Image (spheres, helix red, strand yellow):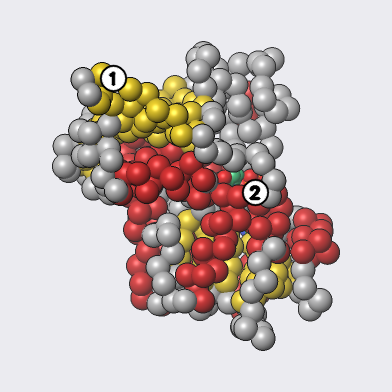
Amino acid sequence: MADGRLRFGIIGCGGIAQSRHMPSLSRLPEVELAAFFDPTPARAEAARKSYGVRDAGVYADYKALLQDSSIDVVHVCTTNASHAEIAIAALEAGKHVLCEKPMATTPEDARRMVETARRTGRKLTVGYNNRFRPDSQLLYQICRQGDLGHIYYAKALALRRRGVPSWGAFLDREKQGGGPLVDVGSHALDLTLWLMDNWRPRLVLGSTYAHLGKRAGSANDWAPWDPEKFTVEDSAFGFVIMENGATVVVESSWALNVVDEGEGRALLCGTEAGADMVDDGVRLNGDEFGQRYVKHLDVARDFTSQPPYGHELQCRLWVDAILRDEEPLVRPEEALVVTEILDAIYRSASSGEAIHL
Ligand SMILES: NC(=O)c1ccc[n+]([C@@H]2O[C@H](COP(=O)([O-])OP(=O)(O)OC[C@H]3O[C@@H](n4cnc5c(N)ncnc54)[C@H](O)[C@@H]3O)[C@@H](O)[C@H]2O)c1
């Protein structure tokens, strides 16, 4: 810490670091962006030039960055398979760590991350930034006030019609650990479990498909992808029964023949009312005075508006948690449960059996 400011290091200076982490962190007065590493050195150098403080450094590898004792906090923004190794090394080096989602590619790795954070006394959080959207924050308050009653059925929705990320390593199972399920499905599942405040899964059934990802010449939201490189699923679905009997359905895709797409959404059905996240806010439904009602709460979803609200609030509260020595809003134990369920969906899809957790 220098002059009461936290010094941050960024490991992995690609898309999400450039578009979200660095702009959000650079707007916080208590933060100095002071260290950068990427295997493509030009990316780290560009990051240093745009966001680095005067004495900021670019490092030859991530271990060298972690040896810099002036760095307090590290953001791990690398491909998924490297999250655990780097996050654990950073915690061992005494840094607080924000690791991008999904936490890790296996529950074992995610568990080691939680254990390392506990043992070292450093803080660990995971980049489930959808929780920080205005509509998510409002719906969370509504749920905690008990307006929905006991939530016993929910859907975690992350359906893209043709939205295959064609940059980076997203199509590579080795480097990412999976496709849309770990990418957009992980966000929707985290959001849904957080809104339900229910982190105890009991039984998981899953199915995955790869019909459309292997086809050339498809429409896409971004540049065309290379079907030869497509080694992950293009859609994945899960059916989860929680210890308290609640059911959570997970729907995720990058490519699916569906018209009503939408990601980062939860649909919740409780004993007193229901709620779902729509394009322009939150919709509540139920029955009052013997009549059905649908109420629309006009609150921004804020995926695209400037500045990047969800990420900015995530960074603001993360810095507060470090400075006040409080638990981060995304607790690593919760992110571990998400990884356990995703892994069980894949295991069930390949074995054809239900997985007991
Ligand atoms: N929270 C969100 O909404 C969100 C959105 C997009 C991506 N992500 C997550 O962020 C991570 C990165 O995604 P991206 O879109 O920025 O991908 P990207 O390919 O644009 O960037 C990844 C960067 O990490 C670097 N890298 C790869 N392996 C590394 C290693 N071992 N050590 C250091 N650097 C390494 C690459 O060179 C690249 O610059 C992924 O885990 C992804 O799931 C999160």
Number of other residues with Cα within 10 Å of mark 1, as a class: few under 14, some 14 to 19, many 20 or more? few
**Local SS, label 2:** loop
Tell me which numbered mark, 1 or 2, is placed earlier along the sequence: 1
Figure quadrant of residue 75: bottom right
Mark whose residue sits in front, 1 or 2? 1
Name the residue located 37 percent from the left edge and 30 percent from the top edge: 284
**Which residue in the structure is indicated by mark 2?**
308
At which x and y percent is residue 150? 21, 39
Label 2 is placed on what type of residue?
Pro
**Where is the N terminus found, in terms of image quarters?**
bottom right
Viewer-nearest residue: 226 or 267: 267
Q: Is mark 2 within 8 Å of ligand 1?
A: no
Name the residue located 62 percent from the left edge and 83 percent from the top edge: 4
351 lies left or right of 278? left
**Which residue in the structure is indicated by mark 1?**
292
Label 1 is placed on what type of residue?
Arg
